[in-house]
Amino acid sequence: MERDSIDRIRSATFPLARRGYDKREVDRFLNKLADWLETGGGDQTRAELLRRELERVGQQTGRILTNAHEVAEGLRGDAEREARRSLDEASASADQSREVTDRHAAEVRAAAEAAAEEAQADAKRTVAKARAEAERIVDEANKRRADVEAVISDLEDRRDTPTAKPSAADGKPRPASARPKATR
């Protein structure tokens, strides 16, 4: 506290009045107050005021920190719930995608198996047709060969026999031009 303020307290005078305060008591009190302020009592008061203010601020800070902690806990809880929800959604989406992919793979596999079976059946039919055609060609070739061999045999027989042969009906010889021709 300033020196001027302390001096004013020491030199303060009050008018005398009947039934008023005892002047000596008031002077004594003012001197004690001035001494107290002079020796740092003001500092002590300020320190007490500061201590109270700090205590009040500390309590307020404590409340703020408690509220901040509660808000942080709430936000953390919200974030955990949101993260859990997002994870659940992602997991469900992955499961759904996996199911769609598995179904598609099964469909593709089934289509490939069906195509392979059809191709195999087509190949068997083609082989069977080719075999049947080959057998027909071989049979026809064998038949032609037999026909050719018969013609050759007939020609060889004719070559070895005289040109005129008796007719079966009358026993008279037939000219060579009247003989039956071999068919091919």
Image (cartoon, grey):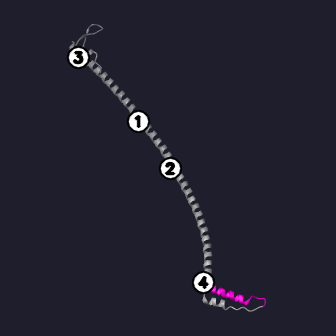
- With 109 as the anchor, is 44 left or right in this view? right
Front disc: 4 or 2: 4
Are the residues at dot 2 and dot 3 in contact (C-beta closer than 8 Å)? Answer: no
Task: Report if residue 21 lies within the magenta region.
Answer: yes
State the residue position of label 2. Answer: 94
Front disc: 3 or 4: 4
Question: Considering only vertical position in the picture, is 37 above or below 119?
Answer: below
Q: Distance between the residues labelled 2 and 3?
A: 90 Å
Question: Considering only vertical position in the picture, is 69 above or below 30?
Answer: above
Within-10-Å neighbours for mark 1: few <14, some 14–19, many 20+: few
Query: Which secondary structure lies at badge 1?
Result: helix
Q: How far apart are marks 4 and 2 (CA)?
A: 76 Å
Q: Distance between the residues labelled 2 and 1?
A: 36 Å
> Most extreme residue toward the top, as rendered?
171
Query: Between residues 89 and 121, which one lies in front from this camera angle?
Result: 89
Query: Which secondary structure lies at badge 3?
Result: helix
Task: Report if residue 105 lies within the magenta region.
Answer: no
Residue at 71% x, 88% y is 26
Front disc: 2 or 1: 2
State which tag comes first along the sequence, 4 or 1. Answer: 4
State which tag comes first along the sequence, 3 or 4. Answer: 4
Q: For the magenta stretch, what is the residue range?
A: 18-37
Residue at 41% x, 37% y is 116
Query: Between residues 79 and 8, which one lies in front from this camera angle?
Result: 8
